[in-house]
């Protein structure tokens, strides 16, 4: 699986748990951390945890190692580091506060909507 397939797996896993406002940013040439950031949010602590757990589980099912999972117990901002893809799963209130989309405003937004409608 290449980084694009990992990105789509991550996006679909988040969507399966009803994550809201899923955005994928192409970080190539912008960040040394990863090729893609996936940003989404849930409306409760339990939903945020379920989204992060689903991303982790689907990545592992496809042979990817989860390098780091941070913030799970607090469920305000969970970071799932998959190497080429880093997923940021926010609680709704925290997402607007940190506003990563604006922080990384020079990153190209990937078109993932066609994948979510399948």
Image (cartoon, rainbow, N blue to C red):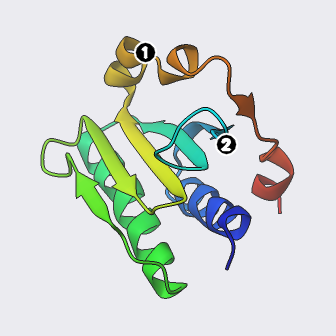
| Direction from residue 85 to residue 50 in the image, left or right | left
Of residue 3 and residue 97, the one placed in the foreground of this image is 3
- The residue nearer to you, when weighing 84 against 18, is 84
- Horizontal side of 110 relative to 96 (left or right) equals right
Residue 38, by quadrant, is top right
Left/right of residue 50 with respect to residue 10 in the rendered view: left
Structural crowding at the residue carrying mark 2, measured as other residues with C-alpha within 10 Å and reported as few (<14), some (14–19) or many (≥20): some
Residue 83, label in figure? none
Q: Nearer the viewer, mark 1 or mark 2?
A: 2
Instruction: Provide the residue designation for mark 1.
Output: 96
Mark 1 and mark 2 in contact? Answer it, CB < 8 Å: no
Residue in the picture at 61% in, 50% down: 35
Q: Quadrant of residue 55?
A: bottom left
Q: Position of residue 63 (x, y in %)?
A: 50, 86
Establish if 50 lies above or below 97: below
Relative vertical location of residue 100 with respect to residue 61 in this rendering, above or below: above
Structural distance between the alpha carbons of marks 1 and 2: 24 Å
Q: Is residue 18 above or below residue 16?
A: above
Secondary structure, mark 2, is loop
Q: Residue at x 33, y 47 (%)?
A: 79
> Quadrant of the image for the N terminus?
bottom right
Q: Position of residue 99 (x, y in %)?
A: 46, 17
Question: Foreground residue, 50 or 37?
Answer: 37
Instruction: Work out whether 7 lies above or below 32.
Output: below
Mark found first going from the N terminus, 1 or 2: 2
Using residue 105 as the reference point, say whether residue 76 is left or right of it. Answer: left
| Circle 2 residue | 28
| Residue 52 x/y as whole percent | 37, 57
For the view shown, which residue lies furthest in the right direction? 114
Residue 94, position as x, y percentages in the image: 32, 22
Name the residue rendered at 53%, 55% in the picture: 85
């Amino acid at each position: 699986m290449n980084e694009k397939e990992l990105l789509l797996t991550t996006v679909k896993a988040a969507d399966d748990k009803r994550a809201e406002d899923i955005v994928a940013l192409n970080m190539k040439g912008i960040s040394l951390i990863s090729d893609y950031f996936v940003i989404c949010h849930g409306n409760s602590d339990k939903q945020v945890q379920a989204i992060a757990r689903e991303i982790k589980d689907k990545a592992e099912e496809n042979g990817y190692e989860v390098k780091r999972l941070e913030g799970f117990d607090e469920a305000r901002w969970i970071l799932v580091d998959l190497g080429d893809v880093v997923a940021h799963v926010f609680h709704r209130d925290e997402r607007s506060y940190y506003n990563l989309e604006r922080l990384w405003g020079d990153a190209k937004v990937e078109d993932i909507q066609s994948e979510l409608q399948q």
